[in-house]
Image (tube, grey):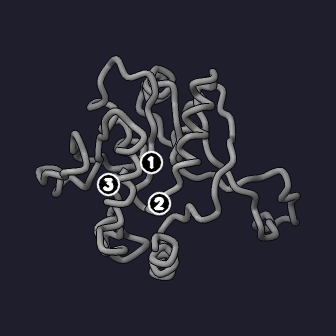
Amino acid sequence: MAGGSGERFGERKQYLALGGARVLDWALRAAAAQADGVVLVVPADLADHAEPLADVVVAGGATRSGSVRAGLQAVPDDAAIVVVHDAARPVPVPEVWARVLAAVAEGADAAVPGVPVADTLREVGGSTVDRSRFVAVQTPQAFRANALRAAHAGAPEGTDDASLVEAAGGRVVVVEGDPTNLKITTPHDLDVAELLCR
């Protein structure tokens, strides 16, 4: 998933330089090392540009969920497992990929990596909540292909695909994530990723 407009960051962060490559190249390399094929979803104005690390390049939609649906249309019908990964998570974490893939192979409809929440959590306008009940969810997220396709039927919207699979009645499991698997959201995150990718 590299279709973001970069509104929060101020520019398309997935195309910025990181350790001698672009941010998205790191994510593409990780995907290519784990998958039989890679579908890259990009902003519509870049869909005609070839990407050597991707098998297929498609234009994203107006929303994240719309972009995932665009990517799913390019996934072969006989694919058993689909992994959705954010290009904005460039730090290599092959063990996380292995864990989400194994969980789906063992029968889950979806598997997401999660890391414990370190900060105190407080509801806006409310009280402090027990952080031990929560994890911060990351990508890559793995899915039984038919469960992900069914979850996207009717074009629902969600902040991630696991929430859509869960809403459709699928079983989502959380596996151990990696705290170094940061999502680049601010320029500071890019500086941290540069250190982690060395």
As shown in the figure, which amino acid type bears the numbered disc 3? Gly
Mark 3 against mark 1, which lies toward the viewer?
A: 1
Secondary structure beneath dot 1 equals: loop
Q: Where residue 169 sits: x, y (%)?
A: 63, 23
Q: Where residue 12 sits: x, y (%)?
A: 31, 69
Relative placement, left or right, of 95 versus 32 is: right
Residue at 43% in and 25% down = 149
As shown in the figure, which amino acid type bears the numbered disc 2? Arg
Marks 3 & 1, CB-CB < 8 Å contact = no
Dot 3: few (<14), some (14–19), or many (≥20) neighbours within 10 Å?
A: many
Q: Mark 2 points at which residue?
A: 89
Image mark for residue 85: 1
Q: In whole angstroms, how far apart are the C-alphas of marks 3 and 2?
A: 13 Å
Secondary structure beneath dot 2 equals: loop
As shown in the figure, which amino acid type bears the numbered disc 1? His
Report if residue 166 is visible in the image.
no
Which is more N-terminal, label 1 or label 3?
A: 3
Report if residue 14 is visible in the image.
yes
Marks 3 & 2, CB-CB < 8 Å contact = no
Q: Which of 61 and 194 is in front in this view?
A: 194
Residue at 17% in and 56% down = 46
Secondary structure beneath dot 3 equals: loop
Q: Which of the 4 quarters of the picture holds residue 84?
A: top left
Q: Name the residue under label 3.
A: 3
Residue at 36% in and 36% down = 69
